[in-house]
Amino acid sequence: MTQPIPPSSPPLKAIYDVAAPAKLNLFLHITGRRADGYHLLQSVFMLIDWCDTLHFELRTDGQISRSDLGSSDGAEPLPAEDLTLRAARALQKACGTPLGVHISLEKRIPAQAGMGGGSSDAASCLLALQRLWGITLPRSELLAIALSLGADVPFFLSGGHAWVEGVGERMTPIDLPAAEFLVVKPAAGLSTQSIFSAPSLKRDSETATIEGFTANSNYGSIFGFGRNDLQPVARDLCPQLGQSLDWLAAQKLEGRMTGSGSAVFAYLPHRMEIPNAPGDWKIRKCSNLEAHPLAGW
């Protein structure tokens, strides 16, 4: 039975307007595969100002509930069981608190985009609930919970941009110059599992180094380092992804997929008028963040 963690401060009645930012993978190399089937990767994860918003209200009956506030961006309805609920239950169990929470989520980050929206929601949930319930887990235990929820969740606890290795658990903080990006999410989504299980996926990229990455630190060129090894497979599986990349190329921009897609993005080297995207695609000009909105929580 879990021993309750003594409160480090009195619980709060509510915490509102908690941000959960999306990420872009500036590059993503697959360097190998473990015996258990997990892929080894190298990537730079960059936080951007495309965010979900969460609200937390204390429940004294120990129950954990969630409501879907929808979105002005037309995001799909949330599944009955999502990562915020799993994160809340995992933290509640780990700290042994009798308290519960009602979570309200305004979803703006697209699903099946490779932008880490669900993982970011889970991380912001873990950080906010520690404050709401007045408890503080050791950082190592919080990171272990995060990793159990998903490979990308620990990154969103790191407080900033990061060089990421292993299966996503090894992170080194890095600084990036302020910049703007055009992000395009076609209507079609992609299954991460279908990409990683593809026989044609390149799994033997040479190991890169942070020094090699930062050697490209002339303003702008750092955003063109490497490639996304998942992109060729994803392009075969999702024609709209290829169309999105072609659309960016027509704007004279160098597009690249983020994560396992289907969102793509391009660095904006100068200010430009953004043309309307085709059909029901989502398009947004984003800036990278100096730090995570919850850094220091």
Image (cartoon, grey):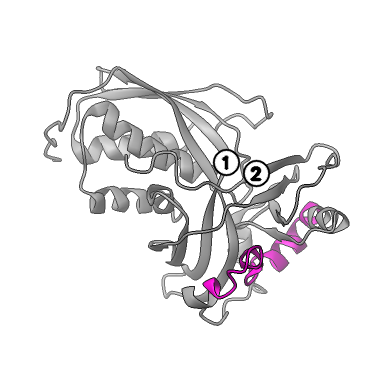
Provide residue 115's location: percent of width, then percent of height: 58, 49
Provide residue 40's location: percent of width, then percent of height: 47, 71
Which residue does the numbered mark 2 point to in the structure image? Answer: 286
Residue 76, picture quadrant = top right
Provide residue 6's location: percent of width, then percent of height: 11, 33
Residue 119 visible to an observer of this rendering: yes
Provide residue 33's location: percent of width, then percent of height: 48, 75
Looking at the rendered image, the quarter that the N terminus falls into is: top left
Magenta span: 213-241
The residue type indicated by label 1 comes to Asp
Residue drawn at x 78%, y 40% as measured from the top left: 281
Which of the labelled discs sits on residue 101, or is there none? none
In this picture, residue 247 sits left or right of residue 6: right
Do the residues bearing badges 2 and 1 touch, measured as CB atoms within 8 Å? yes
Q: Secondary structure at mark 2?
A: strand
Which residue does the numbered mark 1 point to in the structure image? Answer: 49
In the depicted structure, whether residue 76 falls above or below residue 214: above
